[in-house]
Amino acid sequence: MTPSVPPPVDRVAASRAAVAARRARAAVKHSVATRERSAVDVLDTAWGDPAAEAEATLRVRELLTSVPTLGPTRAAKIMSELQIAESKRVGGLGARQRHRLRDWLSTREARGAGQAPARLVVLAGPTAVGKGTVSTFIRENYPDVHLSVSATTRASRPGEVESVNYYFVDDAGFDALVEHGDMLEWAKVHNAFRYGTPRRPVDEALERGNSVLLEIDIQGARQVKAAMPEAILVFLLPPTWDELVRRLIGRGTEGPAEQQRRLATARVELAAQDEFDFRVVNGDVSQAAGEVVDLMRLRPRESHDFG
């Protein structure tokens, strides 16, 4: 009797199917992150529709971290409280786990219904445009806005206060934050010290219902948008190019060669403004600050462009 030979594996087809499945799950996560769908709707679809493979094969951790304001640390805590293992997929949950997870998410969604959502707003723009001046004005005049505090590996300077000016951490501490996914964005500045935005304080402020403002560079803004698609990106513009040049030269903190390098960088940065959700012209600091704060109160699908 001739032994049966298993049919050959179509590796190309299998690879394509795997890619399609990953994309489908990514689309589900994106729809939750942008509030097009609720997490409860994803659960109901996964458990009620046998054809909903993308929802059913999504890991519970991935679903939770897609929910606006729930970061990896908070999601891990929730899963521990609900007695759900890290590896569990939505479709693989037992009856009691399903009940606990759906009940927790339903309660959370009901609590937030009818309230203006807390917003994560990222303020970026070219060098010398006045990002620091605008964010300082907001800090001093809009106490309800939570301004994110960056972490850095450099030592504190005279007058700087821990957790007010920066979180001061050593290299090992910074490495741990990056490794555990606890940084929204980070970069090495001038090939020396590292700076970044810790995610936990941002998540906690949003969870309390406080809108958060991040004042960072354009590369950092892109990283935040990738990590939290619901973030609102605001590009701060100068009134004119000549005014930007005047501000850079007028502050007198760089020599002529460095000024030219920064101006060349500013031209490249200005070209990135179309990647942002809104644009605000910084002609008057108080007006620009007020417009940024107003953006924190917009409803999800409203559109506005100052200037």
Image (cartoon, grey):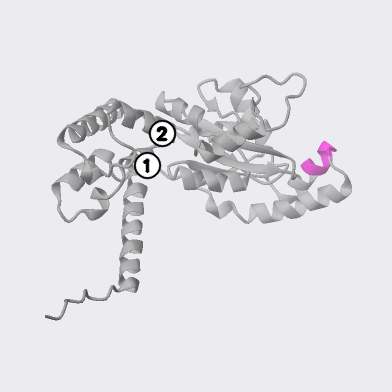
Check residue 69 in the rendering and tell me which mark sits there, or answer none: 2
Real-space Cα separation, disc 2 to disc 1, in angstroms: 9 Å
Q: Are marks 2 and 1 in contact (CB under 8 Å)?
A: no
Q: Quadrant of the N terminus?
A: bottom left
Q: Which residue is mark 1?
A: 66
Q: Position of residue 205 (x, y in %)?
A: 46, 26
Q: Which residues are magenta?
A: 247-253
Note whether residue 288 is visible: no
Residue lying at 44% horizontally and 29% vertically, measured from the top left: 206
Residue appearing at x 25%, y 43% in the figure: 90
Q: Nearer the viewer, residue 15 or 256?
A: 15
Mark 2, secondary structure of its residue: loop
Q: Quadrant of residue 204?
A: top left
Q: Nearer the viewer, residue 80 or 223?
A: 80
Q: Which mark is residue 301?
A: none
Label 1 sits on a secondary structure element that is helix
Q: Is residue 220 left or right of residue 258?
A: left
Type of the residue with mark 2: Thr
Q: Position of residue 30 (x, y in %)?
A: 37, 49
> What amino acid type is highlighted by mark number 1?
Ser
Residue 29's x, y, as percent? 35, 47
- Around disc 2, counting alpha carbons within 10 Å, would you say few (fewer than 14), some (14 to 19), or many (20 or more)? many
